[in-house]
Amino acid sequence: MASLLFSRARTFPRAFSTRTLSWSAVLRADKIPHPPKNVDDSTSALDYKQTQRTRPPPLPAMDLPRSRTAEEAVTNILYNTPPPSLQPFKKHVLNCLVQNEPGVLSRVSGILAGRGFNIDSLVVCSTEIRDLSRMCIVLSGQDGVVEQVRRQLEDLVPVWAVLDYTDTRTITRELLLVKISILGPEYLEDQLLGGPTHSPSTHSDKYTPEEKLEREKVLAHNFELGAHPEAVEAELRECISTALTPSQVLRLKHQHLHSISTLANQFGGKIVDVSENSVIVELTAKTNRVEAFLGLVRPFGILEAARTGVMAMPRTPISSAPGEDAVSDEGSAVDASLLPPG
């Protein structure tokens, strides 16, 4: 009996110490920071698509080419060239809802590249849901081919849904940041070579070998004709020198800055940065307005330009009374006799 009590007394401290160490290890493990776990994983989109599985509508009808002759059929078989589709190419806007995880963008772009599509613009960003991202893809193609690609993208595991906003009333916007010279197009090349500050060339008495050769040719030619050397030298210096006087610099900067500011205000943009020789304009508008603005400021000299691509969101229809539709339809018809001549 005494030996049994002694053996229990020897094992009790060891068990107590083991439990104490294990409990401290658990407490220490709880203090280690871990990244937040995702609410959903990539298979959640697959489960959602299986529960919402419906029979897809048939593919758009492809315009069949004209009937071919025997010679054309044999040529087609020999060269294995299928008859081209007569459907026109037009711009499509695809909106992809994908799982927010690494590798999704590469898989989507890989499918588009495999089908021979060139992505005109691509905008990817997370949404208000932590595990959900939104892709807005703009590409050009035929309706039938784009619909096949859309269904192929929707079959990817981390993709929730792919919507085609081509024939949908949407709000599209694009962000533009453009750096414009305020010295004029004559000094654009000098500003591009001036480094980060875009400083133009300054007056210097040191000429390049080409300028020296040109000066010598002009001096020799005018000396043969009997012209005064000092007048020729002054005229040559005025032609070769590309320097700006301080008053000319101030005048050019003021005029160009005022013109650029007026254009930006007309397009709904604003000047976000003013430096010594250039300004940065921010503009958010449709794609055609962005391109029109770039065309108008190009004569001033564009140093840099960055565009985000198209972002699209569908409009929400407004419910109306049943009688309002008939009234609007009647009012849409215009009598030709009421129009002005011509």
Image (tube, grey):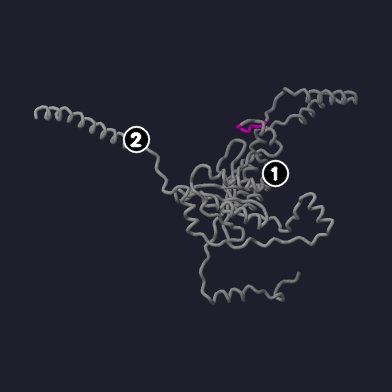
The residue wearing badge 1 is: 299
Give the magenta range.
196-200
Q: Which residue type does callout 2 highlight?
A: Ile
User: Outermost residue, left direction?
Assistant: 2
User: Between marks 2 and 1, how big is the CA–CA gap?
Assistant: 60 Å
Q: Nearer the viewer, residue 289 or 99?
A: 99
**Label 1 environment density (alpha carbons within 10 Å; few <14, some 14–19, many ≥20):** few
The residue wearing badge 2 is: 32
29 versus 56 height, above or below: above
Percent from the top left, x then y, of residue 8? 15, 30
56 versus 117 height, above or below: below
Percent from the top left, x then y, of residue 215? 81, 25
**Secondary structure under the numbered disc 2 in the rendered image:** loop
Q: Is residue 6 visible in this depiction of the protein?
A: yes
Q: Is residue 197 magenta?
A: yes
Looking at marks 2 and 1 on the same chain, the residue that comes earlier in the sequence is marked by: 2
